[in-house]
Structures are given as C-alpha cells and as structure tokens.
Amino acid sequence: MERKLNFLDYLRVDMRRAICSWKFLVGIIGVSIVMYIASMEGIASDTNVVYVVWLIVYGMLFMLSLVFSVFPFVCCFCEDFEQKYGYLQIERGNLRSYTCSKVFTIMLVSALTMMLGMLLYVSLLHIQLPWFQKEEAICQSALSLGGFRWILKRKWYFLYFAFFGFQYGILAGILALLAAFISLFVNNKLLTLSVPFIGFYFISYYSRALFGNVEKINLIYIFNATYNIWNHDGGSFGYAVLVGAIFFVIFERLIYMKLKRKMSYE
C-alpha cells in the first residue's frame, strides 16, 4: 500500500518547484530592476546606498517590485487545477497538508524573492555609491529612528539589507496569499499577479484614513524597516513576523475552506 503524503512531503515538492525554476530567478532580477529604475533620480555622486533605499521605498514605482516578488509561486493553484495536478496530489495525501504547504511556500518564497532582489539591487548600487555616510541626514535618521540600528551601527550593511528586504517581503507574502485566494475564484494568472500591486495601492492610500498615525496596526509601518515602531530592533522585526503569522493562519483557513468546497463540488 502506497504511503500517504504528509506536510513535509508536500513542502519538499513545493519548495523545489518554486525555487528551482526560472520564475524564481526572473522574480529576483525583476525586483532588482524595478528598484534600480525607481532610484535613478536619487543616484548622485554625493549620495549613498542607505539614502537611496530609504528614498525609493516611499515611491509609487517601488510597488511594482511586489509583482515580481510574488511571481515564482503565486499562480500555483491556477496551474495545479488547470492541469488536474492538484486533485492527484490531494488524493495521495490530505487536503490540510496540501493547503498548508502551498500557503507556507507562497509566503516564504515571496519574502525570499524580495530579500534576494534587494540584495542584488544594493550590490549593484554599491558599485557606484558608498554604503553609508554618517553625516547625511537620512543616515542619521536610520541610526536613530529606523529598524535594525544595531546591525547598521556595526557596519554590517549586507545583513542590514537582508533583514530590511525580508521584513518588507513578509508584506509581499501576505499580498501573495490574498492573490492566491482570489485565484481560487477567478482562474486568471494576469489578475492574480496584479492583486499584490492593487492591494498595496489600497493599503498605502487608505490605511492612513482607517488607522491614522497608529503605527502598530498600520501594515505600511509594520513592514517598512525605515520605521522602528517598538523602538527595539528585535521587537519591531518580531512583531512584523507575528503579524505575518496571523495572516498566514487566516489565509490558510480561508484557502482550505474554499478548496474543501471545490473538492466536494467536483
């Protein structure tokens, strides 16, 4: 009798499928290119990498990086059920493990794509600019008000941007889960890829109206490492991870319920 697949079996397949693919590479390069285009006006001989990154995260064009960060795996449900692969995988295991693996992979790979794309971008930027200039005003803000100050003060710039990108990537992961959930209702890959961009637009422009300046419940502040909402590097990053985990649980449940209904109808 064939052994039933468990969560780790599904996860192994999903992670390999997401990371060992051309889409993962395109996502990383796409994030980097979008960031570089967004920063072209900010690059000057008297600036630095930290200054430019802090400048672009507030720009409209930066939102396009979200589309590339979710690109590797956000359409997995579209692909699975178009090709009937999803039904076969669920039959070989169980729906709960299948769903949990997909949701975990979508979120993690989206965050990793954003992080690696940012690392590639800052590496290219550093060819032209120094990492940091302590006397510059934004750099002073980064040292006194921003996240990961402990890392920045020790001049571990690559590690600083790894955490910076991953924290922002958690938001990309949440928006990717929203897109994946919508894809179960409308099986359209173009629409699925556009959801993170549209979602971020609404969060950006309506969260202030909903939450005002209350940073601790505003998603834009929580995942943007230019803010340090708890005035503690570990606390602010941990809080972002916690909020991401809450959204993970919510979307895992919603996607599971939708797939359960889908399986019962078909």
Image: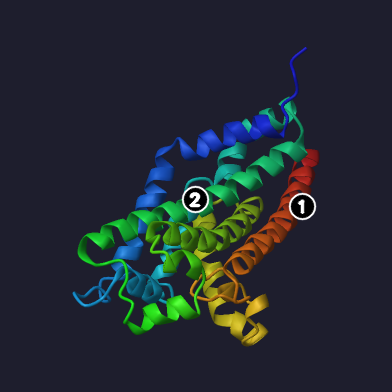
Which label belongs to residue 116? none
Measured as percent of width and height from the top left, residue 10 is found at 65, 33
Q: Nearer the viewer, mark 2 or mark 1?
A: 2
Asked whether residue 251 is in view, the answer is: yes
Residue flagged by tag 2: what amino acid is it?
Leu
Locate the N terminus and report the quarter of the image it occupies.
top right
Please rate how many residues cluster around mark 2, counting C-alpha atoms within 10 Å: few if below 14, some from 14 to 19, many from 20: many
Q: Residue at position x 40%, y 60% from top?
A: 156
- Classify residue 258 as left or right of residue 201: right
Question: Label 2's element?
Answer: helix
Measured as percent of width and height from the top left, residue 18 is found at 51, 40
Measured as percent of width and height from the top left, residue 157 is found at 38, 61
The residue that mark 2 highlights is: 112
Marks 2,1: beta carbons within 8 A: no
Say if 246 sits above or below 259 in the image.
Answer: below
Residue flagged by tag 1: what amino acid is it?
Arg
Q: Residue at position x 28%, y 72% from top?
A: 48
The residue that mark 1 highlights is: 253
View extreme (left): residue: 45
Question: Label 1's element?
Answer: helix
Quadrant assignment, res 14: top right
Asked whether residue 194 is in view, the answer is: no
